[in-house]
Image (cartoon, rainbow, N blue to C red):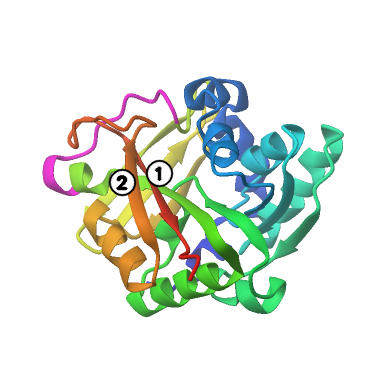
Amino acid sequence: MQNDIYKREYTREFVSRWDDLIGWDSRAEGENGFFERLLRRNGCKTVADIAAGTGFHAIRLAHDGFEVTASDGAETMIRQTEQNADDMDVELADTRVVDWRELHKAFGANRFDALVCLGNAFSHLFEEDARRQALESMRTVLRPGGLLILDHRNYDKILDHGYSSKHRYYYVGDGVDARPAEIRDDLVKFEYSYPDGKKYHLSLFPLRRHYVQRLFDDAGFTNITTYGDFETSFESDEVDFFQQIAVKPRH
């Protein structure tokens, strides 16, 4: 699998339907201000949403008073982010098409108080070297003491026990279904089905929880904290998503 296959999978047609899949209102209700509270608690003001998708988090955070830069590796996604921000009369500090491994080239060092990489996006990278390069670039653009907030599906549960989902927090659009069409140790191919019969697919690398923590540690991040479906106390086999938080050291 190639690291940039997602750029081909996020077709213009699929991206135009992405917001129906997310279900903005239901997703906001499920998150219940988790990311906003986390950022405020850590004194963050400048935030880069580096997996902006169609802009759900970037727009919500900007509306909430943060200075938000939105980037994504897929041009189709960032153009939809710009359209959604314009439609909602929300001003973003910047929008760019940027590969995660090139963040430091696009933005420079010590630029942001926090990075958010959400929606299971980090699963798009299939090579370990690419993941390590991406995390190194993320650490570079963060200011000392800055936060990296990254989420991913509970692939441990999918690989070890098969797929199940509460459909409570992510991909909660009415009538839209998301489930694996193929599960392997090195690939989970998700199928997204819409009420009109249309189906789309995304190829994803199954990131195990402790593997991501090791990557953070190897990249020089500290204070690594994991939430399960936005809770500090959770049963590992019960949650759908992990939210993993790490800090760039001050010294």
Above-or-below relation of 80 to 65: below
- Apparent side of residue 105 relative to residue 217 in the rendered image (left or right): right
Q: Nearer the viewer, residue 225 or 130?
A: 225
The kind of residue tagged 2 is Ala
How crowded is the residue under tag 1: few (<14 C-alpha within 10 Å), some, or many (20+)? some
- Magenta span includes 38: no
Location of residue 32 in the rendering, given as x and y in whole percent from the top left corner: 52, 23
Location of residue 159 in the rendering, given as x and y in whole percent from the top left corner: 18, 49
The kind of residue tagged 1 is Glu
Above-or-below relation of 198 to 142: above
Q: CA distance from mark 1 to mark 2?
A: 6 Å
Disc with the residue nearer the chain's start (1 vs 2):
2
Magenta span: 159-169
- Prevalent SS, magenta region: loop
Q: Which mark is residue 31?
A: none
Residue 173 visible, this orientation = no
- Apparent side of residue 82 relative to residue 3 in the rendered image (left or right): right
- Apparent side of residue 31 relative to residue 84 in the rendered image (left or right): left
Location of residue 157 in the rendering, given as x and y in whole percent from the top left corner: 19, 42
Above-or-below relation of 234 to 129: above
Q: Residue at x 61, y 27 (%)?
A: 24
Residue assigned mark 1: 191
Q: Residue furthest left?
A: 160
Quadrant where the image shows the N terminus: bottom left
Discs 1, 2 touching: Cβ within 8 Å:
yes
Q: Which mark is residue 181?
A: 2
Q: Quadrant of residue 206?
A: bottom left
Q: Element at badge 1?
A: strand
- Apparent side of residue 35 relative to residue 156 in the rendered image (left or right): right
